[in-house]
Image (cartoon, grey):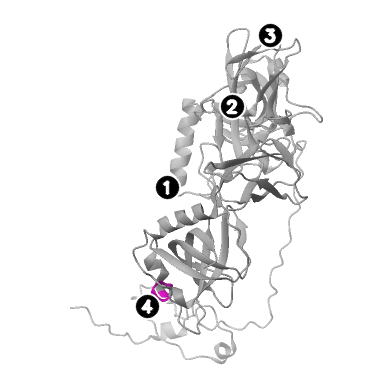
Amino acid sequence: PSPVFVPTPPTPELLSAKRTMLGVAAPVSEAPVPSPVFVPTPPTPELLSAKRTMLGVAAPVSEAPVPSPVFVPTPPTPDPRPPTPAPAYVPQQPAFYGPPPGAGPSWADEAPAARKSRAGLVVALTLGILAVAGVVAAVVFRQEIFGDEARTAAGAAEAGSAAAAAAASARIGAKLAFSPDGSDVRLVFGAIESERPVREILLAVGPSAGTPAAVVQPGKEAPVADLLPAGGSLAPGTLEVPLDVVYADGAVERVEAALAVPYTFRASVKDGGTVPVLRIEFRVVPGTALEAAGAPVEVSADGSAAYEVPVESLRDREGAWKESENHVDVSVAFAAIGPGGERADGSAALQVPITKLRVDFPPREALTTEATVWVRGETAPGAALALDGAPIAVNPNGTFAVEVPLVEGATPRAITLAARLPGSLERRATVTVTRLAPEDLLARAREYEAGIADRLGYSDFAAAASSFVGRRVRLKGTVRSTPEMRGGTVTFVLFVDTASGCPRRAVCAVLVQAATAVPIAERSVVRVLGEIAGARVTTSADFPELPAVRAEFVLPGG
């Protein structure tokens, strides 16, 4: 069991002794004294009036206050050595082999022994091993057209010493990337190789020089125009790009990346009279042979050349023609072959617009009993328009309308329209119209009507038109809207009569879409033969949604 503490009564020697800082009496006799026991001492007036120490024990009050010591700075001892100029500021970016952006400060940003974490130790040891072993830091980059060369600036080359030769160890690969028409050329950086650890590489010329945007990394692009002298342009030969290489030890080396430029080009479309022409203007190194679309191109003594081809002739060439609704993408492959047989391939591509042309009336295949038909539509303002080879007038906004005579008979009349703007491809549209005698048109309508097996009335399908899509119907009524002609379709609203299933004193409306050349006028009475096409949303406040019918025949009268 633990021993029981028994306090020892104080002796006169202890009571008369002086007090320590903790208020415990120290023995005054020289004889051995047993271990001191803490005995609380009654407070004296001096202790009661004294301030308290940090341990809560009263300190005796002195008669006179003791002033606090005042700090007096010691003037610095002047350094007899001459001042060393501070190095120029170079913006720092993470090394190419360092951590990605956002991963925290790299090893280059930390002061010596500032951090002793395990990660920092591993990084320091790794970098030390790499530096001792002389490992080459390289980013692999495949050079597609141009070789990657690098040579040091003249100042480093003139040094001639072994140290200067060892410093000239950085290589920066690059290539040129042309826009499809050759008007914009960009410098794309690739492989970065060095026998010494590299902190960063900076563009030494151009508007971004001296800014964080000047940092070069594999894949970085820079407009070539920014790297050329004021007013200069890219020319075949050699393009030299000055770069500043900042090594891990702070040393800066000027390196110039030299690129071979085998050609420059510029593609455009010009008006060739009846068809647009693709023109490619080249500049090559004198003595270089040039091919375009597999055929040789004559090169002048100064290295200039031009290749022209009608755009329409590229239609059947594999890989050279891709047509969409409003334009055609055309491309021509070319190659520059140097005196030694070295080959540099390229391609020029352009987007050639197609002239707008829309025929609103008549439909592509229409029947009529009229002696003439009005051909209406729209083209691009300023376009030249021809009907069957004869020019026709076009309104300033691009709309047109021309009356075309028809000959009665079973042979359809083909009407061809052609529209073209300068520098654009021609657009053509053909419609056929057959003029029939009234009895012949009626006979065709009766033949179609004989195939209608169901006797569907308006009240049968109107409430659920989507469930009757494709079912044939016959309707009679009055045209209650101005017929709209667009894209070969005539659209109007028909108020159905009671004979077609409309309840008495009710308004029964149907949206009719007809591919017919029969004249249709508002408030005329017509018969409609066709198929149910579901429901259509309208902009009418009275009829926000209507059942729709796609009509094959619209016959006048009863």
Residue annotated with mark 4: 36
* Of labels 2 and 1, the one closer to you: 2
Measured in 3D between alpha carbons, the distance from the residue under mark 4 to the one under mark 2, in whole angstroms, is 114 Å
* Of labels 4 and 3, the one closer to you: 3
Q: Please state the extent of the stretch shown in magenta in the rendering.
A: 459-463
Q: Residue at x 67, y 29 (%)?
A: 182
Mark 1 Cα shell of 10 Å, populated few (<14), some (14-19), many (≥20): few
The numbered mark, 2 or 1, whose residue comes first in the sequence reads 1
Residue annotated with mark 2: 314
Q: Is residue 463 left or right of residue 225?
A: left
Does 146 sit above or below residue 443?
above
Looking at numbered disc 1 in the image, what kind of residue is underneath it? Arg
* Of labels 2 and 3, the one closer to you: 2
Question: Label 4's element?
Answer: loop
Mark 3 Cα shell of 10 Å, populated few (<14), some (14-19), many (≥20): some
Measured in 3D between alpha carbons, the distance from the residue under mark 4 to the one under mark 3, in whole angstroms, is 111 Å
Could you tell me if the residues under marks 4 and 3 are in contact, i.e. CB atoms within 8 Å? no
Question: Label 3's element?
Answer: loop
Magenta stretch holds residue 248: no
Measured in 3D between alpha carbons, the distance from the residue under mark 2 to the one under mark 1, in whole angstroms, is 66 Å
The numbered mark, 4 or 2, whose residue comes first in the sequence reads 4
Looking at numbered disc 3 in the image, what kind of residue is underneath it? Gly
Residue annotated with mark 3: 287
**Quick one: 362 or 350, which is closer to the camera?**
362
* Of labels 4 and 1, the one closer to you: 1
Q: Which mark is residue 118?
A: 1
Looking at numbered disc 4 in the image, what kind of residue is underneath it? Pro
The numbered mark, 4 or 1, whose residue comes first in the sequence reads 4
The numbered mark, 4 or 3, whose residue comes first in the sequence reads 4
Q: Is residue 465 left or right of residue 329?
A: left
